[in-house]
Amino acid sequence: MNKELTTQFMTINMGPQHPSTHGVIRFIIDTDGEIIHRCDPDIGYLHRSIEKIAEKVTWQGFVPYTDRVDYLCAMNANWAYSMAVEKMIGVEAPRRAEFIRVIVAELNRISSHLIAIGTTAMDMGAFTPFIQLLREREYINDLLEMASGARLTYNYICIGGVMADLPLGWSEKCEEFIHHFDLAMEQMNRLVTYNQIFINRMANLAVVSPQMAQAYNLVGPNLRASGIKRDVRRDAPYSVYPELDFEIPVGKGLEGEVGDCYDRFFVRVEEIRESLRILRQCLKMIPEGEVMAKVKKTIKPPAGHYYVRHETPRGDTGYFIQSDGTTSPYRLKIRSGSFTGMSIIGELAKGTFIADLVAIIGSLDVVAPELDR
Amino acid sequence: MNLPELFFYLFAGVTVGFAVVVAFSTNLLHSAFTLFFLLFFMAGFYALLGGDFLAMVQLMVYAGGINVLLIFGTMLTADVAQPERSNLSFQGVLTFFSGVAFTAVLLAVFEHTTWPLLEQPAEVGPTTIDIGKLLLKEYVLPFEVISFLLVAAMVGAIMVVKGGKEQ
Amino acid sequence: MNTQDAFQLIQAKVSAPIQLLEGPTPSILVRPQGLVEVLTFAKEDPQLDCQVLTCQTGSHQEDEIRLFYHLLSHEQNHLFVFECPVPLSDPKAPSVTSLWPAANWLERETYDLLGVHFEGHPDLRRIMLPEDWEGFPLRKDYVTPTSYHDSGFDLTVDNRPSAITQSFNLSKGDEKEDE
Amino acid sequence: METLFLDLGLPHTLSSFLAMTVWAVLLIHFLAIYAGVTSWVERRVAAKMQSRVGPNRVGPQGILQWLADGVKLILKESIDPEGADRFMFYLAPFLMVCGVFATFVVLPWGSFIIPADLNVGILYLISITALVVIGILMAGWASNSKWALLGGMRSAAQIVTYEIPVAMGLLPAIMAAGSLQMGHLMAAQGWAPWEWFAFQNPFAALSFFLFFIGSIAESNRIPFDLPEAESELVAGYFTEYSGFKFAAFSLAEFGNTWVVGAVTAAVFLGGGNLPAFLGESAILSLVVFTAKTLFAVFLLMWIRWTLPRFRIDQMMDFSWKYMLPLAFVAFFGQAIYMMLTYESAMAQQIISHGMFLVFLLVLFKFTGRVMLNVREQLSPVNSPASDLVAPAQPTVETEAQAVTE
């Protein structure tokens, strides 16, 4: 009886083809029954060398590639890059263009958060909210299609402004949508957010303390869920955000500790509300005028390196661009929220269940193309 | 030959067949799964004898509960499918002799007992009411004692599991 | 606090030689020998208070790889850039994983794509590319391979015969023989 | 049915054998067709709940979709995973179908038609599920896949756990009827809702909920679909199955919904009892019974497409820490209720009518909530792009400006 029982860990490959890894990611997990002992994320399955491509294309030519960096919020990626280049060449977009940018980017933020919330709910086994939210996202896609002509990769915001003005009657349609969406969001909250099973699954799970969030360089909603009130739109204001009135939601530990999965989820729900607020204000404030600044056809920014931060739905996305004064970037690095968000998963997953790992991935809102670039 | 008799021989044959598989299979898991069918067909015997309640309890407790746990445990064992030593080679001679001896005793008992033969029961009635009455009236003390024993066993099991976790 | 102030503060307190680089984005140049010392100071000094390593990357210059460390302070709301040149002949830099766990993956990415060896890194493996990939793609002298490990597959053109194309070819061949 | 063959002059053994065969053939066809149609219904119901269309191409409104699916699955290549225990791998799905099919033996079809009204019918129903457990365990093990193994393990643990509250949930009804026989259980209830076990007294209602929740768990449906949780375990114990074997699993799964529905209808919702003035019509009784069963099946679907999934430890906690004690409460409560109201039919009437009124109240409130949701759904949304008044401003101009500079 004194002989010690020998047990083995079971090594499981979760992915690359797994229903809930949100793209092509692989986790090598050692489990003791269902409890994870080690979780080693293996990424790179969607690595498309976008940073290398940047060195081969012109400054304007890279804008469509930014769409592909994170296809869930292509507008924001467009904008982040365009903003960086505008800063380098010292061009300012016209005021109307800035408003249009804010409107489309916030719409895109909503649609991205809808996917984040929906997939989290789907990972929890609730399939209906996901489809319901996809339906709402379709309306946003309709709106963005009216503006840009595309539904997923827009290539709408370009260096110096936006590609085209909003069509006539677009604002009314947008207001109609906002009114509808307010109610739809409440419905969604009743279905998922306040569902006791859902709360039980998410609360007190994978708690990220503020120190840990900073050490692991979490950004955006993930950082704010840990109680750190940091948002690039406020810290390093760009565009017309200083004129707008909006709150920055932070995790309050509604159902458990501050920084658990439920907080990360709920911060996104609240951010959608704030985005709606921003949209309402912008639709009122938007002036008439040009939508495109005068930009030279061949851009040659002065040599040097730049680092531009932008608040995308996945948080503080940094574009590090080094120019040598030629027609294409010398070195371009996209610092993405998913990448650092992913690096914490191995730490968080220890001691949780396999089902929890799925919740953690969902709550951190990791998007594979942005992760691998 | 009437239908129950036909089924009796059918069940008997199948049960013996499964028993052979359980005993001689080198794959422990096959044995465990086959044991399920063995227990399942045992319930058939009870049903044929008119013990409807007993048959169902046999199904529920043995086939549904104990056997599932057995399979559960077997699955958690390392290398069940390829055991280094099959249960055939395990002290074969001793097993053979003890088996023969046991069979001999069984046969002897079987031969020397006078079995009370029932007059062919005209109809097999429900036994549940009788069992219930017996348990709660005539044998209420043994029934309660056994219940108490089971509760004690359960508490003991919990204690053992808890102690194991603390270590 | 701007970079000049930070530079003066670090120069006063830290023995390692640093240098202020002017440019569109001013930055502080540190040699690899003094990197950990300077960055530790930047993290722990209450005035700098750079709790977050927000971005770590590198860029291939002529004969060196220049590492960039973007440090961010949430409390003070400022961002500093530290540059660290490592020679191409011996690309080695100390790892800052012990200061910021986030550096783990960021350094792995830099190692993977630029080939900088971070000494003291707990788990320096390739992260994006396969383990057996040769070369470092983001270096300027990187030649895009035409095949993967002499496997015979041309990576630039996918002309592997699939089962369907093969069956077509076969039928064409048959016809030719018939003629 | 046996008498039918006896009337034809056939010997006793043969006629009872023939009767069994006919029943078996009828039931297995019913099971197959029901499972197929339900798979289509479930998809349509889910689509309706999710603002989708659902399958509507094969046949009118897609009603033949299940046939197309079935044909496709049968024609598909059956893949054996490498290293699989082939015999068990092939056996498992059919064991599961057997387990579900075997329960049909005692399921009633209205008040007057029961294939075999065993005097331990309800006990048989509980215990025969062992076959399903064994099938799942076997599938999980034999697939030689870790996901399948985890699914099989989860499933076995889950079914063994929830069998207890289910059995305990049935006890109050058994006590009230004083029999384990399906026919007696139904006969002990009346046609009106206040004569059903579900509304007999608070404890019976509690046991009804426990039974229904436990049944959901036993049939592996959301929120208890951990064995086949697609976001965690890919597809659980049937991850590696394809072709007809996969179809067999679906058959068992959808067939199980009928079992749950029928037992619910028979034991708690008054079975196929008819009001006295309608007489003893077997057909009408069948219709009533089927309607109740399908309502219960619809409830299952409704729950499935609404709720998220439990985690494994929460699922265990839920059964052992909440359902089991509650089941004991229901059991003792029912005993006390029976003791107190044994002689007073008046009290029984008052309690059951009161229960029904409470239920109506809850239903009323619930309907209000549903109507609120429906109203919100109908709020106007932006119409398609073609409605726009004028096209966008041309963009060429800006390009030209840039060139001139």
Image (cartoon, rainbow, N blue to C red):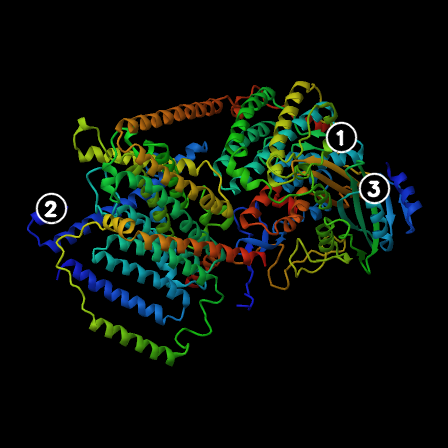
Tell me the element at label 1: loop
Front disc: 1 or 3: 1
Which residue lies under the disc numbered 3? A303
Nearest the viewer among B85 and A341 is: B85
Toward the right, the furthest residue is C12
Q: Mark 1 near mark 3, Cβ–Cβ under 8 Å?
A: no
Say the numbered circle drawn on residue D4: 2
Tell me the element at label 2: helix
Q: Residues within 10 Å of mark 3 (few under 14, many from 20)?
A: some
Q: Are marks 3 and 2 on the same chain?
A: no
Question: In the displayed structure, does residue D176 sit left or right of residue C28?
Answer: left
Q: Residues within 10 Å of mark 2 (few under 14, many from 20)?
A: few
- Label 3 and label 2: CA atoms lie apart by 99 Å
Residue D344: percent from left, percent from top:
27, 29
Tell me the element at label 3: loop
Q: Chain of mark 2?
A: D
Q: Chain of mark 3?
A: A
- Label 2 and label 1: CA atoms lie apart by 88 Å
Q: Residues within 10 Å of mark 1 (few under 14, many from 20)?
A: some
Q: Mark 1 belongs to which amino acid?
A: Pro
Which residue lies under the disc numbered 1? A237
